Image (cartoon, grey):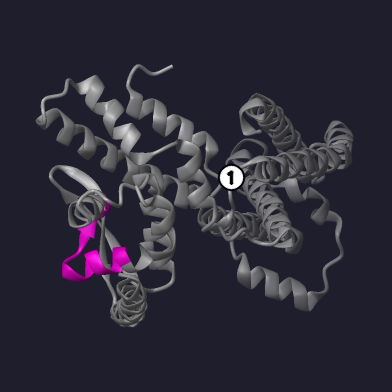
Amino acid sequence: MWAEQLKGHLDVLLLSILSRRPAHGYAVAETLKERSRGAFALAEGTLYPALHRLEEEGALRSRWATVGGRRRRVYALTRSGRASLNREARGWRTFAAGVRGVLEGLG
Amino acid sequence: MSADPITAYLAELRGLLRGSPRDNGRLLLELEAHLRDAQATAVAQGLVALDAAEVAVARVGAAATTAAAAEANCHVPALSLRVMAQALRLGAVLLVVLGLNGLLGEPLSWFVGMDFFFGDERTVAVSPQRCAQLQRLQPAQATCNGALVEHHFGEYIDNGLLAMVLGVVLLGAVRAWRFRFEPVGVERNLLELAMGLAAVVQFSLLALVELPKGLIGTLRDPHLGAGRSLSQGVVCAVAAALFGAFAVRQARRKHAATPSAG
């Protein structure tokens, strides 16, 4: 559900999830599903290229770690990622407030 | 075909990925952990392992979708850079082969003597100054020409070692670069095939030049330095044969990969 709409906003959602604590891809997918109450059920395989791109852009850093007996790549937000998250979140709130204002005007 | 949906999914994805070996390997490792976690979650919810694996595969989505998302991240190095990497590889292989040839001279000399490699130096005229210098360097040799033979043979071995080390370092550097940056796929296979064929031509030509010279010289007199050419010719012929086999294997692999690559 909402997979198409999610495409343009996936980066900010991933940064937001990782701003709480470092996590591996599966934990990120689970948190995304849980916090969106299942609304953002995207193909989870596409999370990894997005995480890799964010890492390449310097918003995330990662390292291999053994979690629960399995080797996983754990991602953490960088300072630049946090700045990017704050900027994107501010923009999103402004956009959402605008949309809400217009929709409420309809009611 | 694998009965495990997760293994089958990963194999399908591996065939579709077009990133560098490093990026592909990392993605496959991460996805495998993801799929096993999703499977474990589904098992904990009461599904049997096989059904749980199918649920996990459904969660990650089609392999083609994941491969397309990964491909969007790929930064393919310019073709000129990839060709240059293959040219460096070819040069590095030449250094390794010639270096190996030089190093083989040492054990060979135990059986056939240094004259097999540098016996022709025994007839070279040496100035008194040069003679004194050579005898300082090779005090065990009674004659100037004996010292000259031993000196040049030592250089031959040392240069072989240096070429080998340089070649191995260069090969390692190119390999690391290709692992990190060069995407897998038809272009990579074709470049490897071209490099293999270039190596066959390079070593065949060297063997064709050196082998007859070495053979004729050795048959005439095995103590007149024809061993250098003979040993180089043999090593180059072996290298040409090895690269020929490598090129055939690459061509077969490329042919086998063609139907699924499309």
Front residue (pair B202, B197): B197
> Magenta residues: mostly which secondary structure?
helix
Q: Residue at x 67, y 29 (%)?
A: B258
Left or right, B166 with reference to B66: right
Q: Position of residue B56 (x, y in %)?
A: 28, 34
Q: Does residue A15 belong to the magenta stretch? A: yes
Q: Which residue is farthest front?
A: A107
Front residue (pair B2, B151): B2
Front residue (pair B210, B39): B39
Q: Amino acid at mark 1?
A: Val
Tell me which corner region of the image, top left, top right, bottom left or bottom right, holds residue B36.
top left
Q: Which residue is mark 1?
A: B184
Front residue (pair A68, A37): A37
Left or right, A32 with reference to B153: left
The secondary structure type at the circle numbered 1 is loop
What chain is tagged by disc 1? Answer: B
Q: Is B228 situated above or below A99?
A: above
Q: Is residue B223 visible in this depiction of the protein?
A: no
Q: Quadrant of the C terminus of chain A?
A: bottom left
Tell me which corner region of the image, top left, top right, bottom left or bottom right, holds residue B105.
top right
Q: Residue at x 84, y 41 (%)?
A: B210
Q: Is residue B44 visible in this depiction of the protein?
A: yes
Q: Position of residue B67 (x, y in %)?
A: 50, 44
> Label 1: how many residues lie within 10 Å, few (<14), some (14-19) or many (20+)?
some
Left or right, B5 with reference to B187: left
Span highlighted in magenta in the image = A13-25
Q: Is A30 situated above or below B108?
A: below
Q: Residue at x 77, y 78 (%)?
A: B129
Q: How many marks?
A: 1
Q: Does residue B77 belong to the magenta stretch? A: no
Tell me which corner region of the image, top left, top right, bottom left or bottom right, holds residue B247.
top right
